[in-house]
Amino acid sequence: MVSRKNILLCSTGLAILAMPSLVHAQEVAQTEVAEAASEQERDGVIIVTATRREERLNDVPISISSVSGDMLSKVGVADTRDLANVAPSLRIESIGPFVQPAIRGVTSTSTLPSADPNVATYLDGVYQQNTVGAIYDLPDVRQVQVLRGPQGTLFGRNATGGAIIVTTLDPEFDAQGQVSAGVERFGTVYGRAFVTAPLIDDVLAFSLSGYAHHQGSFRRNALNNYNRENSDTDTYLVRGKMRLVPADGVEFILTGLYSDRNDHENYYYTSYQGSNVANLIAPGTVIPTGPYDYAANVPGSVHFKSRSVSLRGTIEAGPGEISSTTSYINTTGRLIGDNDGTALPIISVDIGVFSRTFTQELIYSLDDAGPLKGVAGFYYYNNEAGNNPLTFNDLAAVIWYEDRAESWAGFGEFTYDVSDRFSLTAGARYTHENVRGTGFFTAGTIVEPASLPVIGERSFNSFTPRVSALYRVSDATNIYASYSRGFKSGGFNSQNFQTAPYDPETLDAFEVGVKTSGRDLSLNLAAFYYDYSNLQVTAIETGAGGSVTTLLANAASSEIYGLEVDGSWRITPEFNLSFGAAYLHAEYSSFPNASVQSPIFTDFTSSCDFRSGTSALIGNQTLSCDVSGNRAIRSPKLSGNLTANYTVPIGDGDLGFSGTVYYSSKVYFDSQNRIVQPAAATVNARVAWRPNVDSGFELAAYGRNLTSSDVIQSVISTTVADLTRYNPPTVYGLELRYSF
């Protein structure tokens, strides 16, 4: 367990190590890292990289939410799970520890370690394949961009729904840094630090960031008088960077990252509406139903370590720039959990997970060629992931599997300014991918086999174009229209030894929008329509002789359309608002043989119409049902957020108030539309005092989920039970920050 003393020492230690290099910085000025975090705002104009080039947000014909690191801190966003508070149409939920973002109703339901999400996440330009425990802490973030809609041309594979682009602080040649520490409800303590300084003036600089976090137990053990226990989480993260500028127009940044997250609350669940097979096989068994209550005969744990290294290089070449990004990520983990939500030994799992990913990307960006600008590039991807092994019920079943994917792609996108007012953009990406599945089943032993038998091998090719037109109504207002195609790769369900591959998903997106940005008000409006086909879903197939098989297949299509609005309004220099809202229609236009878990009724029957009987609360039966016309999962009809910031000068310092409200209408977690999160609103707030604006000190009090809303974060639905896990209850805390 992490001690509070060690966390505070870790936070201050990084700053102390760098103090000799930093002394002269305070003699010049007390520079806040928050200013660096807002670097993407130049002269009040937001700069984004959605086109793989730096452009004004207003000039990019894509729906984008861009948030600075300073704003994320003000609104209470500590990791990627909280980004929905500031980005319309984004949700980040999970099935067990498998994190599955959703944008505009496009999401995934696969729990394979080798499966890719439908929303791609990029950390400092590097694609993050692994979805198991994929919670990205944001201790040194500079900017987060959420790109809505398929990004098949420039971001490629598995960006069907969109992309989340996280950019962290780079080394600077002006020494500066920040250190902070905080305490929260439930015994939570944390510390973070960032320092950067030159090693050779204007040639070589370094940065080092560290984060340590101990979250106390807030889940209650129903087997021990409902005490809050055994559900703490310990997180460590260290990121180091070296920046080399050997000549004008040449730059290299080397990044190394180590993270360790030992999460004991991620695998504790409560039974949805009290339904559990334990009511049948052992009446009187304690079955928790409260949102923060749990029961288990196996201590839950999701422990993951990630090690990565990347090298980014840029070289100015003629009218543009050559850039290269090389990366390697090695993630290992172990999941231990009780999958029945009781003290009975019904279902327990012990799962080893691994993922090894190598990527290489080369891009040439053209910025200074008159009316023509754009990018062209090449991308290579190699990934190995699987279970080593997955075990059920103390070795009653042992599964070893590994999927390998190798992919390469060529892409380009160019914009031509037909006139000062009118621009046309066209781009395309061609992707070739080879997938190979291997697996082995045994029982009673965990001796790793010398080799894994091949389940299948398949190649996929994809062409994903994008075209758009933008018209500048005025210097402040643009209108645009676009068409784009998204592609999510196919593969094998090797964990279940499914020899038939599932094919790629495709999404054709049509969008029109308006963007306007004035001195004090910016406003973005978008309307979109998606034709989403070949969804990779769990379905039931009836074979010869009436045999029934549950498999991962391309068994559904979906129709999605909606409206979005977001913007900001600076009412006075001290008071500003930012806001976003979305209307979303997302339903399965065809899903005739969905595999659903339907409750067993009091007469021991079950039906696709789960409302036609009374649940006996003894678990579910797997049925093949036609859910065409049902609402797609993780797709609220209405959602929105509003953030207010107000600063009051007090003497030589100031007092800052921040508050965020997030609302979502009801959300379904299964294709049958049975497991539902009712409409809910959450409120976060923060008050920060700076005794002197030049001192670098800040003391803040904050709260998250001040409405005490019970919001489902994860669902596991089986024949045994419907298990749910909820987001944390109300949390409040204090933080002390020092910037230098």
Image (cartoon, grey):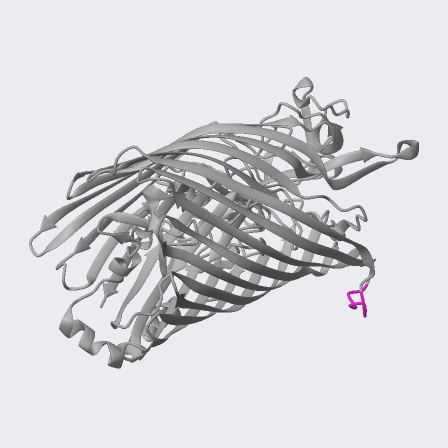
Rendered image quadrant of residue 676: top right
- Foreground of the two, 8 or 217: 8
User: Is 36 situated above or below 66?
Assistant: below
Task: Name the quarter where the C terminus is drawn.
Answer: bottom left
Left or right, 165 with respect to 600, comes to left
Q: Is residue 536 visible?
A: yes
**Residue farthest along the right direction in this orientation:** 545
Q: Is residue 287 visible?
A: no
* Residue 263 located left or right of residue 541: left
Describe residue 489's horizontal placement relative to residue 498 as left or right. Answer: left
Q: Quarter of the image holding residue 302?
A: bottom right
Picture coordinates of residue 11 (x, y %)? 34, 69
Closest to the observer: 648 or 288? 648
Q: Is residue 339 left or right of residue 705?
A: right
Q: Hey, which residue is sitting farthest left in the picture? A: 651
Where is residue 613? Give x, y as percent.
Answer: 69, 19
Q: In this orientation, which residue lies closer to the viewer: 492 or 719?
A: 492
Asked whether residue 330 is drawn in magenta, I would say: no
State the residue in front, 112 or 458: 458
**Location of residue 342 with respect to 183 vertically, above or below:** above
Residue at 45 percent across and 64 percent down: it is 323
Residue under the image location 70 percent in, 52 percent down: 348
The answer to whether 489 is drawn above or below residue 563 in the figure is: below
What span is colored magenta in the figure?
445-451
Residue drawn at the location 67% of the way across and 23% of the way down? 610
- Residue 337 appears at what percent x and percent y? 64, 53
